[in-house]
Image (tube, helix red, strand yellow):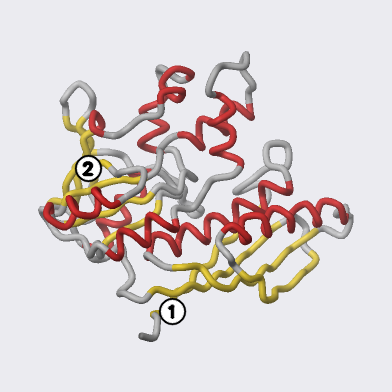
Amino acid sequence: SSGIELATTDTMVEGGHFHQHTTSWYNLGWKVMASNASDIAAMGGFPLYAMVTLGLPPDTDVANVDELYIGILDLADKFHIKIVGGDMVRSSSVFITISLTGTTDVPAMLRANAQSNDQIAITGQLGLSSAGLKLIQKPMKPEIGSDHLITAHKTPYPLIDHGRILVSTGITTAMDVSDGLVDDLGKLCTASNVSARIDSARIPIDSSLKTIFPNEYMNMVLYGGEDYALIFCAPPHIMKCALSKLPNGGTVIGEILSGPSGQVSVIGTDGKEVKAERYGWDHYR
């Protein structure tokens, strides 16, 4: 059967999305490619073709551009993505835009399909990238596990295989976590005209995240971005089937409710429910 075409695009701008003292050229290339591939993963697709546009100041070192492209290609090669063109322009600050196409043989998962009484689940890990960034910005004494948090920030991994499994088991609603769990779940709820409640005690938490950031880890899990985990929603019988097929498993962390569109409430570890403030990434806030 002929596939359904998918497309996505993402831009990273120096100063807004990254700073050269915390992000290498290699990691920049990897991350902007990974964020696009993650959007395709969240729709349940295979990524196919990419176009790359670079904005560079006139004094940019050619070696840096080479390093950027190695990062782009290393991520692309892992998922057999072909780079088919692009553009290079003079710019006062560095920016990179990648557009990526993809395909799926079954209807794509969308953020607008959630219905009340759906369970909400997550696959992948939360909070690691923001913890890794903190460790890069302010190196602490080296602790066991800190390398793995830094790696999660520098070279996040899009969950293409997980997305394929979810879409093939009948999941129709999904989204990747790029701006933070609460913020992205809020966007999904707004698109579906529903609300959500998540139970923070049910969210799986990485042990080194807990050890190194004992007071901050829950904030990182709820509000940290760039983890590229997948949130997905389904009625319980479909959810059970999907969770059984995911290689690293997935975890139900809450449910979709009818209620104020876009509202997310969080049950804290103390059992009290609070309406979460959505303060993820918003360029124009």
Residue 131 against residue 41 in the figure, above or below: above
Considering depth in this image, is 268 or 141 the residue closer to the camera?
A: 141
Is label 1 in a helix, a strand or a loop? strand
Query: Residue 192 appears in which quarter of the rendering?
Result: bottom left
Image location of residue 231, percent across then percent down: 32, 50
Q: Which residue occupies the foreground of this view, 284 or 177?
A: 177
Report x, y in % for residue 65.
80, 56
Q: Is residue 66 left or right of residue 149?
A: right
Mark 1 closeness class: few <14, some 14–19, many ≥20 residues within 10 Å: some
The numbered dot on residue 5 is 1
Q: Which residue is mark 2?
A: 252
Residue 51 visible in this rendered orientation of the protein = yes
Identify the amino acid type marked 1: Glu
Asked whether, in this view, residue 212 is left or right of residue 83, the answer is: left
Q: Residue 107, percent across and down?
A: 30, 74
The answer, for residue 258, to whether it is visible in the render is no
- Above or below for 140 versus 253: above
Left/right of residue 180 with respect to residue 191 in the rendered view: right
State the residue at coordinates (40%, 44%). Answer: 180
Q: Which residue is more in the foreground, 194 or 158?
A: 158
Tell me: 266 left or right of 110. left
The count of marks equals 2
- Above/below status of 111 relative to 203: below
Q: Which residue is drawn at the image coordinates 58% and 65% (left, top)? A: 80
Write down the quadrant of residue 275 in the picture.
Answer: top left
| Residue 157 image position (x, y, % from top left) | 52, 48
Quarter occupied by the N terminus: bottom left
**Can you tell which mark lies on residue 121?**
none
Residue drawn 46% across the image and 51% down it: 282
Binning the other alpha carbons within 10 Å of mark 2 as few (below 14), some (14 to 19) or many (20 upward) gives many
Q: CA distance from mark 2 to mark 1?
A: 30 Å
